[in-house]
Image (cartoon, grey):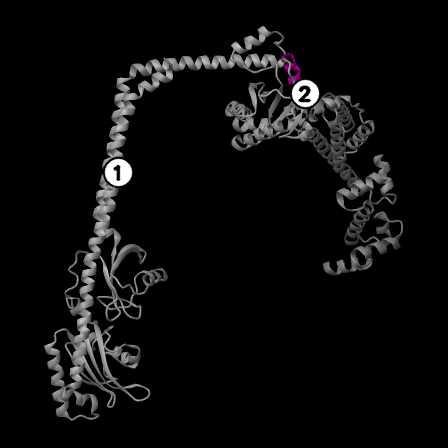
Amino acid sequence: MKANAWKNNGKLYSRFLLSITLCIVLTLLISSFFYYLAYTRLDLKQAYLSDVSSLTRTSHEVNNMTESAQSLTFQLYRTFTISKLLFYTKPNIYDVTAAMNDLTNYLSSMPFIESIYVYNSANNQFYIANRSGQSGIFTKEEISDKGILQTLEDFQTYKPFTPIPRSYVPEDADSPVLPGQPSPVHHVYTYLGYDAVGKNQTINSAVIVNISSSWINKDIGTASSESLGKSFIIDDRQRMLSRDTLALKSLNKQDNDMLLSQIFGQQQPGYIVARFDGQKSLISYTSSDALEWQYVRVTPYGEITGKVSAIRNTTLAIAAAILAIGLLISWLLSRMLYRPIHHIMDKMNMLETERRNSSYTIRQNILRNLLEGAQQLQTKTQLDKLEQSGITFDFTNHYRVVLIKIDDLEALRETRGNDLLAYKFAIMNISWEIGLKHYRVETVDMNEDSVVLMLGRLESTEQPDDELLRTMLLQIQHSSLEYLRIGISMTYSPEANQPQQLASLYKQVKEASLHRLFYGQGCLIYSQQIMELKAKEYKFPVDKEKKLTDALMASKNIDAKQIFASIVEETADYPIHVVQLAISHLTMTVNTILYTIHKNNSLEVETGLNTNIPSLDKFETVEEMNALFFTLFDDIQARLMEKRTVKQSDLIRKINELIERDFANSNLCLNWIAEELDMSSIYISRVYKQQTLTAVVDVINQVRLEHAKDYLENTDWSVVDIADKSGYTSSSYFHRMFKKSFGVTPADYRKTRLAQHG
């Protein structure tokens, strides 16, 4: 029995137990998911029904209160004593007393009324009956409920007997609020009844009834969700007000748009689940009532579905525990029951691996020997032995040899040294998989940077397949670069159909692949084109060689590099042995030049580089080879410059010593110094000027004048004697040079110095 069969049997019990466990877990999860959805909908529905019931009662209460307020207002207008307050400019004290008693009686008989205001615009007075706060007769300036004044001014903007939600502070609100006492702010629904006359529709009189919002809300809030959410009113002006405080709710644009589009003006009650104030919430709402008001309750979604979510999380935890226990049990039982089978399976797998590895190694060695010519394919018996070794490649049909070389090998060896072999096998697998679509393929691992593909046609036709081949090779290059980040260069041979041609094809592509030196990394080379270069005759450019020698001897590095690169570049159109000969010739020439430079400049031989150029297959590009020579040129140039700098420093020091020693010598000049040092005066002048940025003659004159200054200060010699002792043959010339340098004549200079020291 094969190892895979043993392995499958060994996992039978484990799979069976695991399948049952997974079915239980999936059933539990799926059923829990549907239960969760159903219970969530049920919770939302129940919360909505409770909310709508409570909000509807609020709506009915407000409408009933509206009717009561309207009836009360009409009754107040018809009451004889109160009508005198409304229409008489100056009612007498008896009428006022009777009217205030009637107002108080009305207030006492209707507990839901917070206060009643009677306003007469003629005398600008308010007659107020209030349960708490101001009661009595007040002018506009004296009344503490300033909000009612604004309401009267804007009376035309309100529909008659439409409740006006508002809040006000009574006159005693400034007194401190003791613990346990209610807030001084009163929240009321104000009902305005007025008599407007004249063209401008100004108020003649008004009756204002304030009903406490707490009275309307006293029976609201019995629903279970009330403690979890907040209730609001959307009035006919599309404003959102708090149900308890009647304060205007500030909405952001997103919440406002949602309310206008999904809730405002709805003719049927309903609910939505949406984000409100940045929190996911259940929003229940009523339809528009007779006042065109809607009532809304916003309850946090998590508060409603919290218990259902807890049940869901518990179910998930139970499912996870069942799954973990099932996996553990299946693993333990499978190990215990099938340990002997696992032992046998491991042994069989080991034997299969050893056989597979041995077979692969044998096949690779056979193919490698065939390519290198160590083994021949000349008889049918030899071909049959290949099949016995597992090599089914058809060498009697059209086939090619492709040599793959890894680019930038040294850099890859540094970064992927331990894994380089694995990357190489990855390149072989990529090449095999892509090539197998169009050819019979064999891959062979050659040396450390090379892989050989043998590609055999699937169909025997005489039509050339160059286009297909190049497309496939480019695809292999692209895949290697994309998946492995490794560039490869490829050289392919012409087709052959004889087994004995295999070794010659490999030799041809191996030689042609060296032209990567000029083609560059990632190139695709056809070996036949390279072989055709052998017909060309090469003549070494002796004239350029002489220019190279002259440039190096003259330390003209840039010219030397350009000449060297052009000589190497010219060999690109010739076979590789020509390139090798030319490089060898250049190496000998450079070594000769270096020896001469060393000898002429007294450089130590070990400081230079005795140029030994590796074989061309060690270079991937011509730039790498040029860089080796260019580094050599730069090194020699740097050492020559260092040597020359030291020599020139010594020369400057000797010149300065001669000038300082013989400044009094009238014959001291550039030519005299050149004769003393046995050197060219032109060379001395140039070097001195380069190193000091000063001419020799200027330094001589400067030293003489400095000594003359010293003589003028410290001796009583005459100016003529001082000129002579300073090296000047003419006192007038000395006089002129001194004044030019210091701005005064020698005599004046001496007088000035004597005066300073006198």
Name the residue beneath numbered marker 2.
Answer: 511
Secondary element at tag 2: helix
- Asked whether 353 or 540 is in front, the reply is 353
- Quarter of the figure with residue 242: bottom left
Residue 176 pos. (x, y %) = 19, 71
Q: What label sits on residue 626 in the rendered view?
A: none
**Mark found first going from the N terminus, 2 or 1:** 1
Q: Is residue 128 above or below residue 305?
A: below
Q: Give the CA separation, mark 2 to mark 1.
A: 68 Å
Quarter of the picture containing the N terminus is top left
Residue type at mark 1: give it.
Leu
Alpha-carbon neighbours of circle 2 within 10 Å: few (<14), some, or many (≥20)?
some
Could one spot residue 634 in this view of the protein? yes
Alpha-carbon neighbours of circle 1 within 10 Å: few (<14), some, or many (≥20)?
some
Contact flag, marks 2 and 1 (Cβ < 8 Å): no
Residue 454 pos. (x, y %) = 59, 19
Could one spot residue 213 in this view of the protein? no
- Asked whether 233 or 41 is in front, the reply is 41
Left or right: where does residue 269 sit relative to residue 577? left
Residue 71 pos. (x, y %) = 16, 79
Quarter of the picture containing the C terminus is bottom right
Span highlighted in magenta in the image: 499-506
Q: What label sits on residue 29 in the rendered view?
A: 1
Q: Residue at x 31, y 21 (%)?
A: 11
Residue type at mark 2: give it.
Glu
- Quarter of the figure with residue 337: top left
Number of the front mark, 2 or 1 = 1
Secondary element at tag 1: helix
Q: Main secondary structure of the magenta part?
A: helix
